[in-house]
Amino acid sequence: MASINLTQLRRHFGAVKAVDDISLAVDDGQFVALLGPSGCGKTTTLRMIAGLELPDAGTIQIGAKQVTALPPRDRDIAMVFQDYALYPHMTVAENVGYPLKVRGTASSEIRQRVQDVAKQLQIGHLLERRPAQLSGGQQQRVALARAVIHKAQVTLYDEPLSNLDTKLRLEARAFLKHLQREVGVTSIYVTHDQAEAMALADVIVVMNEGKILQVGSPKSIFQTPQNTFVAGFIGSPPMNLLECTIDGSVLRFTDGSRLPWQHALPTTARGTVTFGIRPEHVTIRPIDEPGTLPATLYVTQMLGGESLVVTHVGEQLVSVRLFTDEVPELPTRIGLAFDPARVFFYGADGNRLT
Amino acid sequence: MQRRTTLSRPMSLAFISPAFLLVALFLIYPFFSIFSMSFTNQALTGAAARNPQYVGLDNYANLFDVDTWMTRGEFGSSLWITTQFVFGSALIGQAGLGMLIALLFFRRRDLVRHVVYTLAIVAWITPDVVIGFAWFAFLDPTQGTLNNILSIFGVPAQDWLLQYPLLSVIVFNTWRGTAFSMLLFTSALNSISPSYLETSQVIGASRWQQFRDILFPMLQTTIATDLILITLWTFNTFTPYLLTGGGPSYQTELMSIYTYRIGLQRFEFGRGSAVAVTVMLINLLLASIYLFISRTRKTR
């Protein structure tokens, strides 16, 4: 087990700044998710940690060891790929035991450790099969077994669940988290699925355009997004972001409507800012209630245990999440009330104002 | 879903008949005529030309006559030369070198690769006659390029085609046909998902382990296909005739050249047909191995 330190890591592909001078410290035993849209640099970062890609600049340290220029095999890591990369000509047992075979472990010991790991991952009954005879979920477990068998210091995951269907993915997610708790190995997990990152990780690293935008626990990332990108990426649906102008103690929105704001404003908030509030912190009131923002009903969606009401404020959409399994009957014009403690203000550069 | 045919059955037969007619005329008819001729003493000149006699299996018995057949210029000797030629130039030369080049330039996109691939493909697609002449000039004992190059290193001039005839044609044919194996292996390698090799890199497999445990098993059926195809082609190739004419003293007389000499230079049609039929049977055997392999590949 080991910590990981990335310092000023850079990788450009021509004009594309895939990874642009990022620094990151991962503690021993932590489960870290690199989260971002496709092309944000998360996979390139992972591949540089693995040694499959060499950085243009910067350093990578695993434990006490500088590994920046070392080949993958000298980094003591394991990796799980999106397509699992199980060797089709080997049985499950041979696949799982291959890391040990490469190291020249005695075949009796390989057999024993394969048995142990297979039991732990509940694939003991599959050992004599070939990968082609396994379901997607089973293949995924075999790939995990191969990754944990040689007790590497760090395990890297490159979107390992995205080839599974929704139901299997939820199962695998729970299983993976349980496994990581049990094995306790430092893990870096690349995903574009924010729900997956929230569910699995101790620490989420949100990336976009080769930069790290925010690092924090799932809770802090969700509750206090530091910029509009993170705010608009995390949550389902994500945070409502409305442009408005501060005019004394009144917020003026783009459609001309005014919202009196008696609560404290960030000291640096001036002029045009972005007003952010999560859908679950908005409530629906009658249109004529003072202290509410007038909005037009657009559509209501029934989502099982909850409902989503989407409204218009001028051109901008505002979602409201209601924890009810009854779709409410609403008039066309409604008032929106915001929980002032949950409102965030972001400046013109997208960063949170405090 | 039911298959719908655009054409009625008689109509499609009508369309296919010209092709069938040509195949029958130039492939099926000669096949049977050669087969029946191989049991006669038919020739272009002499008494047998006017009045060919049925001689039973005499022609075949002649080919496999244990007392003489390994004599230079006889059937057995030619078969042995052909075997060495196939082994040296196809199996070791073309397949081996092709695999080496494919592995060497795997996932590389640089100028060296570009040059090597272009040269190999040019050697492969240039017409036989041009190639034959070029190599004749290359190996020429007095003015040849090869001797000129070697003289720089102090190697005395050799008459390659006279002193090392079989080796010369083996090297020639390796050079000539490596591109096919090279391209086949290259495309097979490229179709292997990168994550397979990356996984093995992370696991810590050495280059040799990567080849032995991952690439080779995944290339197996491609290699088998390649070996059978180039064996067939090399077995039947006639191009070395342009370099050596089968000589000196039959030392490079491959099966194809032997057949040509008996049937079309000495005009012993009966005996030549027997050779042709034997060669055909050998080819049939090789081809059925190929079909067997490709079928097991499909059912796997």
Image: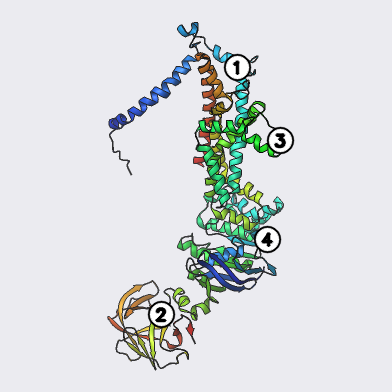
Examine the rendered structure and indicate whether residue B289 appears above or below residue A149: above
Query: Which residue is label 3 attached to?
Result: B155
Q: Amino acid at mark 2?
A: Leu
Mark 1 or mark 3: whose residue is earlier in sequence: 1
User: What secondary structure is marked by label 2?
Assistant: strand
Query: Which residue is label 2 attached to?
Result: A241
- Is residue B189 visible in this depiction of the protein? yes
* Closer to the camera in the image, B56 or B44: B44
Q: CA distance from mark 4 to mark 2?
A: 47 Å
Query: Which residue is label 1 attached to?
Result: B64
Q: CA distance from mark 1 to mark 2?
A: 92 Å
Check whether the beta carbons of the residues at disc 3 and disc 4 lie within 8 A of each other: no
For label 1, count other residues whose C-alpha is less than 10 Å away and answer few (under 14), some (14-19) or many (20+): some
**Left or right of A256, for residue B126:** right
Residue found at the very far front of the displayed protein: B143
- Is residue A85 visible in this depiction of the protein? no
Residue A336 picture quarter: bottom left
For label 3, count other residues whose C-alpha is less than 10 Å away and answer few (under 14), some (14-19) or many (20+): few
> Which of pointers 3 and 2 indicates the residue nearer the eye?
3
For label 2, count other residues whose C-alpha is less than 10 Å away and answer few (under 14), some (14-19) or many (20+): many
Q: Which mark is residue A74?
A: 4
Q: Amino acid at mark 3?
A: Val
Q: CA distance from mark 3 to mark 2?
A: 82 Å
Badge 3 and badge 2 both on one subunit: no
Q: CA distance from mark 4 to mark 1?
A: 62 Å
Examine the rendered structure and indicate whether residue A168 appears above or below residue B43: below
